Image: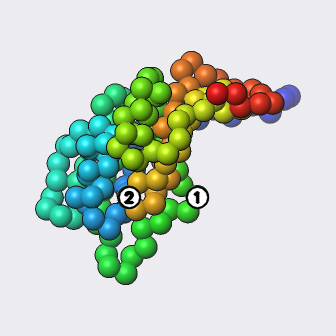
Amino acid sequence: MPAAKKPKKAAPELAFNHAMIYVRDVAVALQFYKDLLGFKLIEQYGPSYARLRATKGQGSIALHRAEANQPVHSDGVRLYFEIKDLDKFCVRLQKSGALSEPPKMMPWGWRHVYLNDPDGHEISLYWAGRKRLQKTVMRKSAAR
């Protein structure tokens, strides 16, 4: 008699809530994320904490002032923000001096541009469209 198969467990309903970003100065970080990138302020607690939401979707970020001896670098972590009209948005960023080069098409089929926030956290602005949740097909060249 064959062994009975165990029923599959349902995947937990895990939802991404927010990313905590440690910064040296919350006011400076707010200028970048709110005034430059367009995040909307949800709440702020003095000079040590602010929570913001993206203008589209459910994503949010929290800016938390790091202690004087606490590092703020985030080696190996990059924040990705998707925007449909990436090129138009990047023109505004270039005029502000926050961006030195225009977006380009990557071999995996997404348009990207990379920059750093005032504390050096890596940021990727991109547009993937319908390719965002599809399996990646690498191309040989990254034409603009």
Identify which residue is drawn at 36% across, 63% down.
22
The N terminus lies in which quarter of the figure?
top right
Horizontally, residue 22 falls left or right of residue 135, namely left
Q: Amino acid at mark 1?
A: Gly
* Residue at image mark 1: 76
Label 1 crowding class (10 Å Cα cut-off): few <14, some 14-19, many 20+? few
What's the distance in space between the residues labelled 2 and 1, CA to CA? 17 Å
Residue that appears at 34% across and 63% down: 23
Q: Where is residue 101? Give x, y as percent.
A: 53, 41
| Disc number placed over residue 118 in the picture, else none | 2
Viewer-nearest residue: 106 or 53? 106
Q: From the viewer's perspective, is the residue at label 2 or at label 1 nearer?
A: 2
What amino acid type is highlighted by mark number 2? Answer: Pro
- Residue 107: image quadrant is top right
Q: State whether residue 62 appears in this view.
A: yes
In this orientation, which residue lies closer to the viewer: 133 or 141?
141
Q: Is residue 66 above or below residue 144?
A: below
Asked if one can make out residue 12 in the rendered structure from this viewpoint, the answer is no
Looking at the image, tell me whether mark 2 or mark 1 is earlier in sequence order: 1
96 w.r.t. 69: above or below: above
Neighbourhood count class around disc 2 (C-alpha, 10 Å): few under 14, some 14–19, many 20 upward: some
Q: Position of residue 118 (x, y in %)?
A: 38, 58
| x, y percent for residue 78 | 52, 50
